[in-house]
Amino acid sequence: MFATMMHGAGDVRYEEVADPKIIAPTDAIIQLAVTSICGSDLWPYRGYGDFDGPKAMGHEYCGVVVEIGSEVKTVKKGQFVVGSFCLSDNTCPHCQYGFQSSCQQREFMTGAQAPYARIPLADGTLVGLDHLPDPSLYPDLQAVSDVLGTGWYAADAARVTPGSTAVVIGDGAVGLMAVIAAKHYGAERIIAMSRHPSRQALAKEFGATDIVAERGEEGIARVMELTRGIGAESVLECVGMEQSMQQATSIVRPGGMIGYVGVPHGVTFDGQKMFFAQSGMLGGPAPVRRFLPELLELTLARKIQPGKVFDLVLPIADVAKGYAAMDQRKAIKTLLTLGD
Amino acid sequence: MFATMMHGAGDVRYEEVADPKIIAPTDAIIQLAVTSICGSDLWPYRGYGDFDGPKAMGHEYCGVVVEIGSEVKTVKKGQFVVGSFCLSDNTCPHCQYGFQSSCQQREFMTGAQAPYARIPLADGTLVGLDHLPDPSLYPDLQAVSDVLGTGWYAADAARVTPGSTAVVIGDGAVGLMAVIAAKHYGAERIIAMSRHPSRQALAKEFGATDIVAERGEEGIARVMELTRGIGAESVLECVGMEQSMQQATSIVRPGGMIGYVGVPHGVTFDGQKMFFAQSGMLGGPAPVRRFLPELLELTLARKIQPGKVFDLVLPIADVAKGYAAMDQRKAIKTLLTLGD
């Protein structure tokens, strides 16, 4: 089959690779319904981190099971499934504690920007639907598998509660999903920090009550003004850079929580500063698996429409264009169609 | 009157000072029942931090109100009161949110190692008792005003829940109080890290189920062994040094919380490490005022006996000996009696 490979910074190709096959008896092979490009795919695309040879890209996925290993019990051939970018057994103590993203057998998904993909730990990772969903729901289900679940975790880690104020830092796909999550958790005021008109509009559609376009010290001052100098109970940090983390610690109220889901790049925290600010923090790769049943229920009932975050749709053969568009911030998130 | 003044590192004197008097209409003057030396008094005693001239020492206190300012309404002359080392109005948004230690009017108490002391923001800071307590309760009530409340906050911030595992790092007075708190919050397993036989014994009396005497990597390995490689839901960090914080982040389970109440000295956190470990954190100066009503109820009913932490009792004229004994770790905590 053809699949998406990254050969180096800025060099993404749709090229022939070996078909995926069952390796472990706990594997499943799925035929993807659609696939997509994640903001985190841009880190290697932009040359961050180590790069050791061509890499099979893609970790967001939903589709139909076409083959299962001999030990797979909870999903079957022909069933539509959604999984998480973190592969987990869903039985170890960390999974049982709701932190499947720290599963003792954790692996990270790769190779999902392709028509077919191998899903290790299928029983623990995949959640099957009772029926084949209407294709109009594919973008929503695809969003559930990573960005929605990650935004959900940001709200969960930041302990958004009914009637509270939540600030979302970052207007990428995860930040926009975090707005949906903050609304679901009952935040009365949702302040989205965004400079881009199209993203501001989507944030408002998803439930943001206030937009702060300013950044840095001005952005901090504006949030503090909106919260009457108090700060926010919950800050959902969806970027992971020094400046955004700085912003988060400056606008969270004493005793409030920062849920941070952007992988921190070059970020350190000063212990004494955090101590006297009484800033609570919890972050990490999102345990999407914990949220999947609820997210699927909301999505299938069309109570939330996370798929709206896809503002560029391309056939997968044009995947390189999708990366370029997101790199240049011409697209929030790219959906890749797989044809027949 | 005579009171305790620090003139520089290692130089504590009991010497004549001006009597405290009402300065603001929100002040009260109390006659202390007893007083005490706090572990945090040892920081300047050991030469840490800036030192700008003689300093009136002491921030732990309980006693009888002898004078009130014209605006004080909730306590009256002759009433026995207990307060916190953080002075707060208990009405501002941060106080209302339960973080009185970040009160918009916050001041830190000083001058309580003396027979009389001025308490600013008396209405917000002090909690009055209905009756004069039995003098046998003075050590307990004195412990409530700081170290017990601080240990309580460690357990609260670390979100100790019934049936969980809590690890207490630090066997100073606050660490020992944190054991009481962890037990009160229902931890099934309380692992106290302590090398000192007398402190181990007190930790066990307060509710510790396991003692880990090892430190550093060995201590981490021992806790991980005790928790079957999983780590603890809650870590109560009661020291504030690089090594102890390192220990905390190494033994908390993914999704668990570190409640840190020792003022961090030279501690920084690596964002990416905390992210992938999914270590939650909340710390700061304890909002003791939030806990005072409950702690007083428990103490007056003799359900807890935090005063047992005092293992050295000296007349206040010998205050310098009390500092020396704690500095040399010959005493956990010194109670100072005030005579008649």
Image (cartoon, coloured by chain):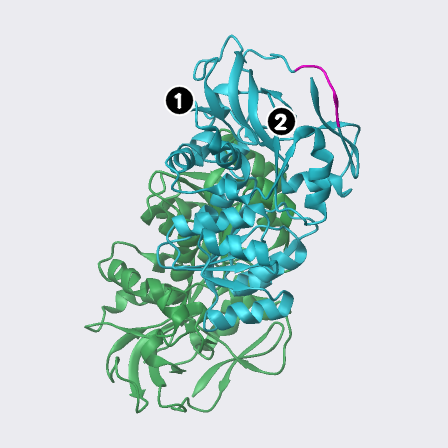
Chain colours: A cyan, B green
| B239 and A213: which is toward the camera | A213
Q: Is residue A15 magenta?
A: yes
- On whether residue B331 falls in the magenta region, the answer is no
Q: Name the mark on residue A112.
A: 2
Label 2, residues with CA under 10 Å away: few <14, some 14-19, many ≥20: many
Q: Chain of mark 2?
A: A
Please give the residue where the numbered disc 1 appears in the rendered image: A131
Tell me which residue sits at (51%, 20%) in the image.
A64
Dots 1 and 2 on the same chain: yes
Q: Hey, which quadrant is residue A336 in on the image?
A: top right
Kindly indicate the quadrant of the structure image that contains residue A75. top left
- Disc 1 to disc 2: CB gap under 8 Å: no
- Taking the spot 57% from the left edge, 50% from the top edge, the residue there is A238
As drawn, which residue projects farthest toward the left?
B131
Secondary element under disc 1, as helix, strand or loop, is loop
Callout 2 secondary element = loop
Using the image, determine if residue B162 lies above or below residue B308.
above
Label 1 sits on what residue type?
His
